[in-house]
Image (cartoon, rainbow, N blue to C red):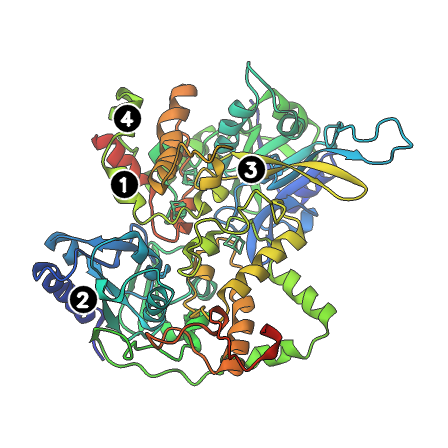
Amino acid sequence: MMSLEEISQKIQASAKRLLTEGKVEVVIGYRRGSIPMMAAPHFARTEDDCNQLIWTSFARTNLAGYLSKFSGKVAIVAKGCDARSVVGQVVENQILRENLYIIGVGCLGMVDTELIQAKEPRLYREVTEDITTIKLFGADWNTNIVKEEVLRRNCKTCLSRTPKETADELIGDEVQPLPNDNWADLKALATKSPQDKLVYFKNLIQGCLRCYACRQACPLCYCPVCFVDETQPQWLGKSNDEMDTLTFHILRAFHCSGRCTSCGSCEAACPMDIKLREFNRILEEEVQKEWNYVPGLSWEQKPPLTTYRPDDEADFIK
Amino acid sequence: MTEYIVKDKLTFLRALASSGYNLIAPISMKNKIQMAPTDPDKVDLDYLNTFLSPKSLFFPQTEKMMAFHKDLTKSDAFVYKPLGLDQVKPSVIFGLRPCDAKGLSVIDKIFQNNRFTDPYWNTKYEPSVKIGLACLNPGPNCFCTAVGGSPFGEIGLDAITLVRGNGFGLKTLSAKGEEFLKNTSGLEIGDLTGEIADLKKKVEASLPLPLDLSKVQGATILSIFNQPHWKTTADRCLNCGTCTFVCPTCHCFDIQDEQDEEGGVRIRNWDTCMSWLYTVHGTGHNPRPTKTERMRQRFMHKIKYIPMKQDGTCGCIGCGRCVQLCPVNIDIREVAKQMNQG
Ligand code: SF4
Ligand code: SF4
Ligand code: SF4
């Protein structure tokens, strides 16, 4: 298996090559964060910048959301789910394919720091990682944690860990999906009564601060004005009223249906640890069932809910 | 100032709860430690700090300020009447970390000063008795000492305690604290001076050195305002506002009116300078048009404006919450260093 250092070096080399050859103006990737278990999005334009690019399991935010902020040619370091979001940006006309270069990386999954701390609650001073393991160092102790045991939920069920369909180049080994069923828990939810579902959803959003960090971290949420921020008319109250909060989450999920790639950026950004991807997953499954559509795997196919054809076979739409 | 020895933690917490005050203390909620009203038996003292800052005790995320009804048979239909300003049962807050207590005192100077008093803050903050818990084991992202604080800091507290065997050492810090504690059962007068001084020195030594902010202090607002690093850092900022919601000194709010068939309420909600909506004018003009201006505002406020208005006290008290929770690792210490470099 290729080590984290080797993958990082290859990313750096590729970034330098693309910049020197003038193929792109900037390479978007990650660099080491200022604190343990944290990576920072990084925009490399010079050789020095390139030397800071790393591959890590502590990446939190999907980088695809940054693409539309650049007008020139851009390269992006992308794991499977991120590459799918990047494709989404092209399919939805947010960026031009010809301005884009995808450095794909086979991904063994990102880790959930909450799970790490649940396993090792003692106060760490330093944290290191290699490709399969995380090592925590305290004042007079250290612990190894196997990454596969603390993966983010979306990484456990990811079916596109290597972006081989769409990347312009691939770094690292091709990674196979884990044998987990993404929809197992949704089956139980589907059998609940509407009242019980409402209770379930209300519990899910308990503690939500209405900060919208989830929306800001989501590469799909690029609307210049989000419906929750509209003031004329104001669709939604601004307090922590349960129904207003629930409306935000449900409407956002509908806006993302057939587009969400389960990258987990929203949940990773949420300060309150709200598992809001539940809303998206339900619709993700529906879209897959109804239209056999998985977002972000093809440059041509549009998300089913954003297309309209006069000869559509469903007649409710005519 | 009196120093006491508290033999047993639980007996002491029970005494606080039966003092005629509401006991507020750290408890575990949804796997996170939060400050909340509680039974003494449920208090969790094994915590680094509360997950969210304690500001919500006095400045909740959503607060109903006024209400009116639409019953036209009554003469006060459609007249707003204030809510939540009646004399409430005061609280005794146990377990505040010194950084957060200092943070509350920063907001206090903004919400009540010689120009105005915010009654919603004042009614809750003023009568409450705040008992701190000194930090013997600071966390990896704590930096109170970098911004003028201390794990044994006393600002904003009526008394401070430190864990000592099965009990606490306790020192009163204000007349209010003195008065409140003098009748509490289970306290013995003791002498902690040497012990506190030793521990304070030891724990402080494990924390970061003071940040050099001398140039920020000397520089004009405009010269810092126009520094080139703002744009570079803001490039990765998501304007998600997490930093502001979790910060013990961020205090911006928005006021909204809501109504239904029967009546209406005026509500104050937390707001964030990271949002474009926060500053957009009715005309559509926005004085902070991009995320660079919005992000700059937060750091200027913390590191330049608050110190200017509060005799040099930094607006960041070094709790580390935003550093830990910012999804893209914008670290206020790094920003402060850049501001100081000019
Ligand atoms: S779900 Fe989390 S990130 Fe989204 S608005 Fe609520 S608290 Fe913020
Ligand atoms: S938490 Fe970080 S990304 Fe979010 S607004 Fe604050 S600085 Fe920006
Ligand atoms: S700016 Fe960050 S570290 Fe400073 S007081 Fe606020 S949340 Fe804590």
Kindly identify the amino acid type of the residue bearing the numbered disc 1. Lys
Q: Are marks 4 and 1 on the same chain?
A: yes
Whether the residue carrying mark 3 lies under 8 Å from ligand 3 is answered with no
The reply to whether residue A77 is visible in this rendering is: yes
Identify the residue under disc 2: A11
Identify the residue under disc 1: B231
> Mark 4 or mark 1: which is in front?
1
Q: Chain of mark 3?
A: B
Labelled pair 4, 3 in contact (Cβ < 8 Å): no
Q: CA distance from mark 4 to mark 1?
A: 18 Å
Q: Residue at x 61, y 49 (%)?
A: A235
Single out the residue that lies furthest toward the top.
Answer: B114
Give the image location of residue A166, x and y in percent: 28, 75
Labelled pair 2, 1 in contact (Cβ < 8 Å): no
**Secondary-structure class at tag 3:** helix
Answer left or right for A63 relative to A237: left
Kindly identify the amino acid type of the residue bearing the numbered disc 2. Ile
Labelled pair 4, 1 in contact (Cβ < 8 Å): no
Q: CA distance from mark 2 to mark 1?
A: 25 Å
Identify the residue under disc 3: B55
